[in-house]
Image: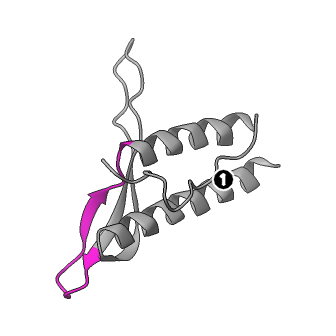
Amino acid sequence: MTLLQRQAAFERLLTALARRRADRLKMGYVGTIRRLAPPALPGEKQGATLYYVNAAPRRGSGPELVGLGSEANALLRRAEKWVESGEGPPPELPAQGGRAGKS
Protein backbone atom coordinates (compact mmCIF):
# COMPACT_ATOMS: atom_id res chain seq x y z
CA MET A 1 0.00 0.00 0.00
CA THR A 2 1.36 3.45 -0.88
CA LEU A 3 1.64 6.35 1.55
CA LEU A 4 -1.32 8.08 -0.11
CA GLN A 5 -3.44 4.94 0.24
CA ARG A 6 -2.48 4.63 3.92
CA GLN A 7 -3.33 8.30 4.49
CA ALA A 8 -6.73 7.81 2.83
CA ALA A 9 -7.36 4.74 5.02
CA PHE A 10 -6.47 6.83 8.09
CA GLU A 11 -8.93 9.55 7.06
CA ARG A 12 -11.70 6.95 6.62
CA LEU A 13 -10.94 5.53 10.09
CA LEU A 14 -10.98 9.00 11.67
CA THR A 15 -14.29 9.86 10.01
CA ALA A 16 -15.86 6.56 11.07
CA LEU A 17 -14.73 7.05 14.69
CA ALA A 18 -16.04 10.63 14.69
CA ARG A 19 -19.41 9.62 13.22
CA ARG A 20 -19.74 6.83 15.78
CA ARG A 21 -18.92 9.24 18.63
CA ALA A 22 -21.53 11.73 17.40
CA ASP A 23 -24.14 8.95 17.13
CA ARG A 24 -23.41 7.75 20.67
CA LEU A 25 -23.91 11.30 21.93
CA LYS A 26 -27.13 11.55 19.89
CA MET A 27 -25.66 14.47 17.98
CA GLY A 28 -25.36 15.17 14.28
CA TYR A 29 -21.94 14.71 12.69
CA VAL A 30 -20.57 17.92 11.16
CA GLY A 31 -16.93 17.01 10.59
CA THR A 32 -13.60 16.30 12.23
CA ILE A 33 -11.10 18.72 13.69
CA ARG A 34 -7.41 18.01 14.01
CA ARG A 35 -5.44 20.13 16.47
CA LEU A 36 -1.73 19.84 15.90
CA ALA A 37 0.52 20.03 18.91
CA PRO A 38 2.55 23.22 19.21
CA PRO A 39 6.15 22.96 18.04
CA ALA A 40 8.35 21.33 20.67
CA LEU A 41 10.98 23.38 22.41
CA PRO A 42 14.58 22.32 21.79
CA GLY A 43 15.26 19.07 23.63
CA GLU A 44 11.58 18.31 24.27
CA LYS A 45 9.47 15.59 22.72
CA GLN A 46 6.80 16.61 20.18
CA GLY A 47 3.28 16.52 21.61
CA ALA A 48 0.47 14.45 20.12
CA THR A 49 -2.14 15.62 17.65
CA LEU A 50 -5.60 15.84 19.21
CA TYR A 51 -8.72 14.78 17.30
CA TYR A 52 -12.26 16.02 17.82
CA VAL A 53 -15.65 15.53 16.24
CA ASN A 54 -17.50 18.70 15.36
CA ALA A 55 -21.03 17.68 16.34
CA ALA A 56 -24.35 19.49 16.53
CA PRO A 57 -27.12 18.71 18.98
CA ARG A 58 -30.15 17.46 17.11
CA ARG A 59 -32.24 20.26 18.59
CA GLY A 60 -30.65 22.75 16.23
CA SER A 61 -28.22 24.69 18.40
CA GLY A 62 -24.74 25.34 17.04
CA PRO A 63 -22.05 22.69 16.67
CA GLU A 64 -19.53 21.99 19.40
CA LEU A 65 -16.22 20.18 19.58
CA VAL A 66 -16.30 16.85 21.37
CA GLY A 67 -13.25 14.73 22.14
CA LEU A 68 -13.21 11.27 20.61
CA GLY A 69 -12.20 9.60 23.87
CA SER A 70 -9.08 7.88 25.11
CA GLU A 71 -9.58 4.53 23.37
CA ALA A 72 -10.32 6.16 20.01
CA ASN A 73 -7.26 8.37 20.44
CA ALA A 74 -5.11 5.31 21.21
CA LEU A 75 -6.39 3.66 18.01
CA LEU A 76 -5.60 6.82 16.05
CA ARG A 77 -2.05 6.93 17.49
CA ARG A 78 -1.47 3.37 16.28
CA ALA A 79 -2.94 4.33 12.90
CA GLU A 80 -0.62 7.36 12.67
CA LYS A 81 2.39 5.06 13.18
CA TRP A 82 1.05 2.64 10.58
CA VAL A 83 0.64 5.46 8.04
CA GLU A 84 4.26 6.52 8.59
CA SER A 85 5.80 3.04 8.55
CA GLY A 86 3.42 0.95 6.46
CA GLU A 87 4.28 -2.01 8.67
CA GLY A 88 1.68 -4.51 9.79
CA PRO A 89 -2.01 -4.64 9.02
CA PRO A 90 -4.04 -1.45 8.73
CA PRO A 91 -5.90 -0.42 11.90
CA GLU A 92 -9.57 -1.33 11.85
CA LEU A 93 -12.63 0.21 13.40
CA PRO A 94 -13.61 -1.81 16.49
CA ALA A 95 -16.88 -3.70 16.43
CA GLN A 96 -19.90 -1.58 17.30
CA GLY A 97 -19.93 -3.13 20.77
CA GLY A 98 -16.35 -1.87 21.28
CA ARG A 99 -15.61 1.02 23.57
CA ALA A 100 -13.70 3.30 21.19
CA GLY A 101 -14.90 6.83 21.61
CA LYS A 102 -15.71 6.50 25.31
CA SER A 103 -13.72 8.53 27.76
- Vertical arrangement, residue 20 with respect to residue 62, above or below: above
Q: Quadrant of residue 62?
A: bottom left
Mark 1 Cα-neighbour bin, 10 Å: few <14, some 14–19, many ≥20: some
Label 1 sits on a secondary structure element that is helix
In this orientation, which residue lies closer to the viewer: 48 or 20?
A: 20
- Vertical arrangement, residue 98 with respect to residue 27, above or below: above
**Going by the image, does 14 lie left or right of 91?**
left
Residue 30 percent location from the top left of the image? 37, 76
Farthest top residue in view: 43
Q: In percent of the image, x 53 and y 65: which residue is there?
A: 16
Q: In percent of the image, x 60 and y 63: which residue is there?
A: 12
Residue 93 percent location from the top left of the image? 58, 56
Residue 2 percent location from the top left of the image? 81, 49
User: Which residue is label 1 attached to?
Assistant: 7
Farthest front residue in view: 97
Say if the magenta span includes residue 42.
no
Tell me which amino acid carries mark 1: Gln
- Vertical arrangement, residue 23 with respect to residue 86, above or below: below
The boundaries of the magenta stretch are 56-70
**Going by the image, does 13 lie left or right of 101?**
right
Q: Quadrant of residue 28?
A: bottom left
Residue 85 percent location from the top left of the image? 71, 33
Say if the magenta span includes residue 68.
yes
- Vertical arrangement, residue 29 with respect to residue 91, above or below: below
Q: In percent of the image, x 39 and y 44: which residue is there?
A: 36
Q: Quadrant of residue 56?
A: bottom left
Q: In percent of the image, x 67 and y 59: which residue is there?
A: 8
In this orientation, which residue lies closer to the viewer: 57 or 30?
A: 57
